[in-house]
Amino acid sequence: MGNLPLVTFAFVSVLGMAVPGPDVVLAITNGSRYGARHAFLGIAGVVLSDFVLISIVALGFGALLLASEFYLSVLRMFGAFYLLVVATGTLRNASRPAFNSNPPETHHSAKALIGRCFLVAVTNPAAWLLFPAILPHFVRADEPIAIQYAILATIAALADVLMLMLYAMLGSRATTLLAGPNAVWIDRLYGIALLGLSSTLILQSLGHL
């Protein structure tokens, strides 16, 4: 299909998601607060962002954004401030029980989980840098472009589901092991991690603006 085998793209996708980032932190947080099953809703938001970003690359807009340091910095700043909002909410809820007596299975909570993780993933500058840089190497001009990008998007989505579910299960397991008063430290640590990520993105944006 392209100059490089699809198994290479699958490996790169898994490796990219294995590196801790905003998506990973949210997967662990969702797993610890709601359990692995509900964390899958957040993972669905990340998968949706994959299809959106790869569609943008397929249409040629990814390369245009990649060539503009200014717009990349604006995107980075937007993502950083959104992470700051999520981190603040996580720290604010750190003292609440990880599992409520009323399970968060409402339509509103499902939309909130999907929407929050989608926004974090779609504004992640790492994804905007990764997809335009590597996708063209797996696409041949003499074959149907749309089908090739659809296959690549599916592989990326499967890699995200695999890795993020593992992290969500890790978060769920951590809550079980730290049941009781110590469980609140899980959310505190994840909130601090999100604050660190947002601060790094803000500093990077200020350095390019």
Image: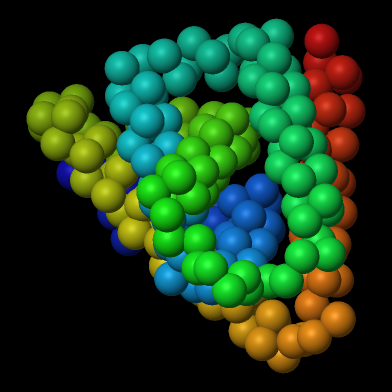
State the image quarter where residue 66 is shown: top right
Q: Residue furthest bottom?
A: 177
Is residue 191 in view from this perspective? Answer: no
State the image quarter where residue 34 is shown: bottom right
Could you tell me which residue is drawn at 65 percent across and 20 percent down?
75
Could you tell me which residue is drawn at 22 percent across and 39 percent down?
150
- Residue 120 in the image: above or below residue 207: below
Q: Position of residue 185 (x, y in %)?
A: 85, 71
- Residue 135 in the image: above or below residue 7: above
Q: Position of residue 51 (x, y in %)?
A: 34, 37
Foreground residue, 182 or 56? Answer: 182
Is residue 188 in view from this perspective? Answer: yes
Q: For this view, does 185 lie left or right of residue 154?
A: right
Q: For this view, does 154 lie left or right of residue 194?
A: left
Foreground residue, 208 or 104? Answer: 104
Q: For this view, does 192 lie left or right of residue 130?
A: right
Q: Position of residue 158 (x, y in %)?
A: 34, 59
Could you tell me which residue is drawn at 87 percent across and 36 percent down?
199
Could you tell me which residue is drawn at 32 percent across and 27 percent down?
55
State the image quarter where residue 172 is shown: bottom right
Q: Position of residue 179 (x, y in %)?
A: 75, 87
- Residue 43 in the image: above or below residue 181: above
